[in-house]
Image: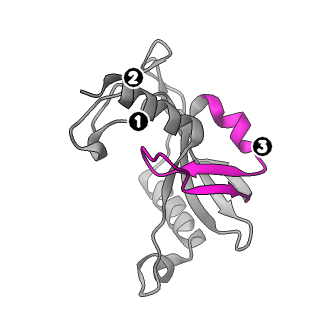
Amino acid sequence: MVYKLVDINGVAKIKLSDEKEKTTLPGEKLVLRIYDDASSKPAFDLLCLATELDELITAKSLTVFDTFGKEPTLRDFTPSKIENLSELLFSDGAIQKEVGKLSERRLACMEEFKSFGGADALLGEDAHDYNVYLSEKLNTLANSLLEKYHR
């Protein structure tokens, strides 16, 4: 397990790297699963700041970005459903939620896999990439810190 510092006392931090892919995203984040209105299947996952949860869950449309993108990847995407995938397991060294047995977690993962259409949809000839995007606020924060601290 690798731990990267992203926040100190509520102030977002970023770890810079010469390789953009290795630069950490700042701030406390959550992962949201965004479902497509047409198919009701997962369309993409969205990384956002934890403080954005209520705003995004009730949003009628979303504008999302590729990591460190300057222009939106999707504008005015209308989700049919938004699901928070993040769970707080530890806080201040104390267990907040039991994760259950490995066999139970495996079954849950297999059910999630089926929601994407199973092996053919993700691994077959007609497989498509499943994208993870950034919220507008997370992308703006990341880019502003990059500009501020970039050597």
| Camera sees residue 128 | yes
Within 10 Å of the Cα at label 2, are there few (<14), some (14-19), or many (20+) other Cα atoms? some
Residue in view at x 45 percent, y 58 percent: 103
Confirm or deny contact between disc 1 and disc 2 (CB under 8 A).
Answer: no
Tell me if residue 67 is in the magenta stretch: yes
**Of marks 3 and 1, which one's residue comes earlier in the chain?**
1
Q: Which residues are magenta?
A: 51-79
Name the amino acid, label 1. Leu
Residue in view at x 71 percent, y 69 percent: 40
Label 3 sits on a secondary structure element that is loop
Q: Position of residue 113 (x, y in %)?
A: 52, 68
Q: Position of residue 81 (x, y in %)?
A: 73, 56
Q: CA distance from mark 2 to mark 3?
A: 28 Å
Disc number placed over residue 13 in the picture, else none: 2
Tell me if residue 123 is in the magenta stretch: no
Residue beneath disc 1? 25
Determine whether 86 is above or below 6 in the image.
below
Q: Nearer the viewer, residue 64 or 84?
A: 64
Name the amino acid, label 2. Lys
Name the amino acid, label 3. Thr
Extreme residue toward the left, this view? 18
Residue in view at x 47 percent, y 27 percent: 27
Residue in view at x 50 percent, y 79 percent: 121
Q: In which quadrant of the rendered image does the N terminus lie?
A: top left
Number of numbered discs on residues:
3
Q: Nearer the viewer, residue 52 or 41?
A: 52
Within 10 Å of the Cα at label 1, are there few (<14), some (14-19), or many (20+) other Cα atoms? many
Confirm or deny contact between disc 3 and disc 1 (CB under 8 A).
Answer: no
